[in-house]
Image (tube, rainbow, N blue to C red):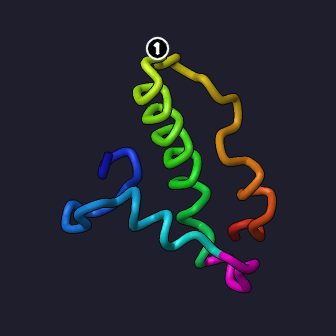
Amino acid sequence: MHRRLQMPDIIEDPLSFLLSQLPTKEPVSSHSVSPWYVRWPSTCLILHELDQLQHNKPILPNPLPHPGQRLLDWLPSPV
């Protein structure tokens, strides 16, 4: 999971860490949103896979065409 989210191994629970860092208001700096363009789609796919496992459903290779797109549309474009 660390590799998929591009997080260092020293962070014990990268999924919880990222979810707690979600922006609650529109960021001013495009520099602060750049990591979300990589990490958020991966986070959404991981959450989808966990949901599928919890409900004993098969995990499809590409279940979501644009995972997390609503958040990415809301964030300012990175430079």
Q: On the rendered structure, is 22 left or right of 74?
A: left
Which of these two is toward me, 23 or 3? 23
Which of these two is toward me, 32 or 1? 1
| Residue 67 in the image: above or below residue 27 | above
Q: How many marks?
A: 1
| Residue 56 in the image: above or below residue 23 | above
Magenta-highlighted residues: 24-31
Q: What amino acid is labelled 1 in the image? A: Pro
Pick out the residue farthest to the front: 55
Look at the image and say whether residue 33 sits in the magenta stretch. Answer: no
Q: Main secondary structure of the magenta part?
A: loop
**Among the 4 quarters of the image, the one containing residue 25:** bottom right
Query: Which element type, helix, strand or loop, lies under badge 1?
Result: loop
Mark 1 = which residue? 58
At 80% across and 57% down in the image, what residue appears?
A: 73
At 40% across and 62% down in the image, what residue appears?
A: 16
Q: Position of residue 69 (x, y in %)?
A: 73, 47
**Viewport quadrant of the N terminus:** top left
| Residue 55 in the image: above or below residue 37 | above
Q: Residues within 10 Å of mark 1 (few under 14, many from 20)?
A: few
Q: Position of residue 47 (x, y in %)?
A: 49, 42
Which of these two is toward me, 54 or 4? 54
At 56% across and 44% down in the image, what residue appears?
A: 44
Q: Position of residue 43 (x, y in %)?
A: 50, 49
Q: Position of residue 53 (x, y in %)?
A: 41, 26
